[in-house]
Amino acid sequence: MGFSLRNTPIKRKLTLFILLTTSFALIFMGSVLITYEVVTFRRSLAANMTVLARIVGSNTTAALAFEDPKNATEVLGALAAERQITAAAIYDDRGEIFARFPNDAVANIPPGPGPEGYVFHGAYLDMFHSISQQEGGQLGTIFLRADLSAMYSRIAVYAGLLLFVGVCSSLGALMLASALQRTVSEPILDLAKVAQAVSERQDYSVRGTKYGEDEIGKLTDAFNQMLIRIGQTTEDLSAAKEAAEGANKAKDDFLAVLSHELRTPLTPVLTTVAMMKDDEANRPEKMRDLEVIQRNVEVEARLIDDLLDVTSITRGKLELRREPVDVGSLLEDAMQNYCMRTAAERNLRVTFNSTATEQRVLADSARITQVFWNLLQNACKFTPAGGTIDIRVWNEVSRHSMPDLLVQIRDSGIGITYEAMPRIFEAFEQGERSRGRSFGGLGLGLAISKAIIELHGGTIRATSEGEGKGATMTICLPTTRSAPLHLDGIPVPSLHSRRARSLRVLLVEDHADTAEQLTRLLKRAGHDVICAATVKEALDRAESRVFDLLISDLGLPDGSGYDLMRDLARPKRIPGIALSGFGMKEDVQNSIAAGFIRHFTKPVNWHELQTEILKVALA
């Protein structure tokens, strides 16, 4: 039976290759020898210098004692016989040079003695050694400098020899390895090609070729068996992926339905409050009660929005509608709408100072307002009565052509502990983890604010000197030179405004309370309103009369508001406003695609809805 290298165990192959490539060991061995030579030479030189320093020091004791520098210079002159000594000096007990060698200014001799011992630097060895009397008193110090060029010359010769031997060994090993490496590399390369085919084409039907019965052959068998099993884990993963995608869609559907069901009952509450607040006969106590109801309903709606926002952020689906806006104006509006009332109720002093000359930012105004709302509400909530809230706006130079806009909100509230600071921008964190938190909230505001600011290319950071010492939130946003995009400038009218024409409005809403309250508000605003609860009923109403505006819910018992909008737009274009408890991005896009001019998410803010109606009335 002939010898087959392919059937030889890999251990023997490796042994053979090691024997054929031992020339590489010469480099390592030569390096060790050179290192050993350097270390030995340096130790030997240091020892010789120490002995020489003692001898010279002993011979100059009398000269130092009797202050005879001439004698000391003669002793140092004897060092000329030591070729490696390039400079020497004797210092008296005051640290001044007493004698030197050579006796000229060329030698770079230290002006004073250094610490006892020797040190290598560059191509020299410097040594300082004390000169003492027999009684033990120190008379001075001797300095010796030795040239190491002889050692480096020897190292250069060794290195040259090492390089020559290493090159020759490498060439010989390369020729031998080139002839023998295919025996091991070919089957491994074949396996690599199979693995690449699997990776690129996801084809688990390919198999590696077995070349022998050695360890590589056994590896090929194991690899092929693994491909068989992976082809079966793949089928399972595909099924699991489909199940996960189904579960994810079910979760999205659940969140959408949950949002709709939670929002819908809030709309009639807000519209009722808006109508009651318009009654001029209201007493102050009643107005305060109505404001409490309105404020808490708005907070409830904000919590729903925050939960949906966190879901969108987690899935990377939070998108912005950016345009050049004046962030300073957004901040002032947020202060007036979300801060001043609460601050007045809690007796908080609010100051505002702006020195910014550039305030335009390419931003989603609604999202930036949401950030300011979160920060201002937190400042009011966590600041005790009688405290202060200071708001600053200024510009700072940035790396870009335009400066950055910084907005800082500082309060004198409960502060942030050192332990809580690292997680302050995490979802469901509120600076403390106990369930009995005194300030309420889900801890989503800062997490959402951070995501929104970062999507705008900015940063937000929190600082605090500790518990009870207040907190500071600082936002940094890049400004833009683009001119701000202004809306049509239509002011929010009062409920009794008669500046615009009365509209014939078709209101389609299957939630009875919402339909009733919206109808009352629209009629009080001077509009003629006809109600319908289904798509069929709305189409029947539209056949018998002409309407100027459609206000419709989207989820109706016998169809969708999308279909209704499309049907009504066919004979004659009619503006439509969508009202829905579904407020995700896809819902808004579907409303616009169906022909609606605006999508409002329930609960609907009456003033915002009234402004949109006024645009239609003035068109």
Image: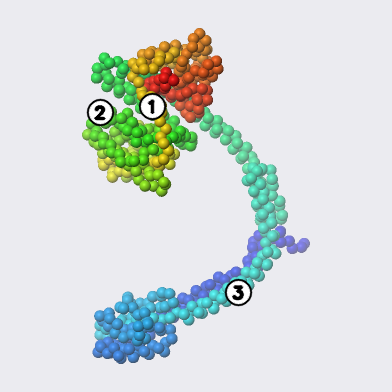
From the viewer's perspective, is residue 70 above or below residue 195? Answer: below
Q: Nearer the viewer, mark 3 or mark 1?
A: 1
Of residue 132 and residue 527, the one placed in the foreground of this image is: 527
Displayed quadrant of residue 551: top left
Q: Residue at x 39, y 17 (%)?
A: 500
User: Which residue is identified by label 2?
Assistant: 345
Q: Is residue 238 above or below residue 186?
A: above
Q: Residue at x 58, y 70 (%)?
A: 25
Q: Residue at x 37, y 35 (%)?
A: 326
- Residue corresponding to mark 1: 489
Residue 495 in percent (x, y) is at 34, 17
Q: From what the image shows, is residue 121 above or below residue 509?
A: below
Q: Secondary structure at mark 3?
A: helix
> How far across and down, in percent of the image, does residue 49 sit?
39, 82
Q: Position of residue 228 (x, y in %)?
A: 66, 43
Q: Mark 3 and mark 2 in contact (Cβ < 8 Å)? A: no
Say if residue 567 shows up in the picture: no
State how far apart marks 2 and 3 are (Cα): 90 Å
Name the residue carrying label 3.
165
Q: CA distance from mark 3 to mark 1?
A: 88 Å
For residue 557, side relative to residue 192 (left or right): left
**Type of the residue with mark 1:** Gly
Q: Quadrant of residue 459?
A: top left
N-terminal label among 2 and 3: 3
Marks 1/2: CA–CA distance: 32 Å
Describe residue 555's horizontal placement relative to residue 500 as left or right.
Answer: right
**Badge 1, how many Cα within 10 Å: few under 14, some, many 20+?**
few
Q: Nearer the viewer, mark 1 or mark 2?
A: 1
Query: Horizontal and vertical percent for residue 414?
Result: 27, 38
What's the residue at 35%, 83% (across, down)? 105
